[in-house]
Image (tube, rainbow, N blue to C red):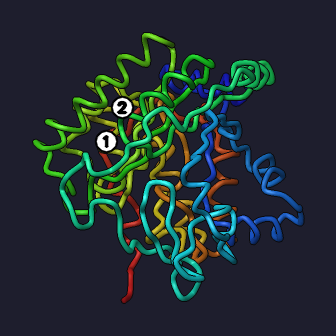
Amino acid sequence: MTPRERMIATLNRRKPDRVPIQLGWRHEVTEAVQRHYKVDTGGEVARILGADMTRSVSPKTRWAEYEKKVNGTLEGAYAWMGPVILHDSRTFEGPWGVVQRVGADGKYLEWVSGPFAETDDLDSFDWPADRVIEDDPELPAKVDTFKKEGYWVVGASGVHPFKQAWHMCKRSAAAGVDMLQFWGDVAMQDRMIVPPERWRALDKQAWKRIITETRKVNADVTFFFHSDGDVTPIIDDVIEVGYDVLNPLQPECLNPAAVKAKWGERVTLDGGGSVQRTLPLGTLDDVRREVDFLLTTCAYNGGYVFRASNVVSFDCPVENVVTFYEMARDYDLSKLEGPPEVIPDPPCMSIEVHA
């Protein structure tokens, strides 16, 4: 199967030739895996490991007023962000007015301030909406080319606030993308960040309108929902508004097997590999047990995309990382006949974590 055929089968609850695979890791991991395979690029790694979601497109944006204020670029791991408003060598401001600082070790960003740090007045911010989005007449042809080459095409709609999200969705859907992804955490490991009733009153209504209106432009587009943490209180709502894929199934706070058993006929699951326990702290046997757990409990009838439950970080041994993905790539799904009789606990929870 091509990546596109594999994803279509999976979303339609048909068992594909193998589980679809998506990579997601920090640059330090990419470099370590390249050294492991003795290759020069991340693209070569993706081919070796059978990654399926490797083609994405996005409407063009241009922040004209912001561009007038930029005064430099960051050094090190975050140089890829390009020109920013530098407050000092480590502190910078992005186009949404959010100020962040690169940590002393250069590995993480910390929030410093934002446009609503001192006010609750949402009208005090000059919301860009669609004026920073530029028409791209070449986008439909680019999408069509990727599809003809057998790729599943993801439209990069990202973390944009709701009004701009609609404009991004509309343009991406009109171009014919296969899937639109939205990233934004609404839960922690032990509870929701936003109380479920407030999420239903605010976010749910916005998402329902965005998804409904987008499908008037492209009825076939797939919607992907991401939130870390325990989102079980709102999974029914997420499905109800029209999301098709639920990510990332953080196994330290919810059981992917239990989610599959309860909701697997209504939503495709994506993720589940432990980045807090198994990948950084487990043995190779622990890694193999986790892969087997995820595939036997979640992939027996399609409806599951294999990946870690968050970005694979630099604390994960490269042997664990490549074993995790190689085993999934080579796993024989034909031997899976149906759901387990008893729902097992995630094997990652048996791995000790020491402070």
Q: Are marks 1 and 2 in contact (CB under 8 Å)?
A: yes
Nearer the N terminus, badge 1 or badge 2?
1
Dot 1 falls on a residue whose secondary structure is helix
Residue carrying label 1:
259
Amino acid type at circle 2 is Gly
Residue 168 % position (x, y): 50, 31
Q: Residue at x 44, y 41 (%)?
A: 128
In x, y percent, where is residue 350? 37, 71
Disc 2 crowd rating (10 Å Cα; few below 14, some 14-19, many 20+) is: many
Q: Which numbered circle lies on residue 264? A: 2
Relative vertical location of residue 109 with respect to residue 39 in this rendering, above or below: below
| Amino acid at dot 1 | Val
- Residue positioned most to the left: 197
The quarter of the displayed image where residue 334 is located: top right
Q: Is residue 126 left or right of residue 230?
A: right
In the image, taking residue 335 as reference, residue 272 lies left or right, namely: left
The relative height of residue 142 versus residue 47 in the rendered view (above or below) is above
Q: Nearer the viewer, residue 96 or 251?
A: 96
Pointer 1: residues within 10 angstroms few (<14), some, or many (20+)?
some
Rendered location of residue 175, percent (x, y): 63, 19
Q: Tell me if residue 16 comes above or below residue 120 in the rendering.
A: above
In front of the other: 219 or 76:
76
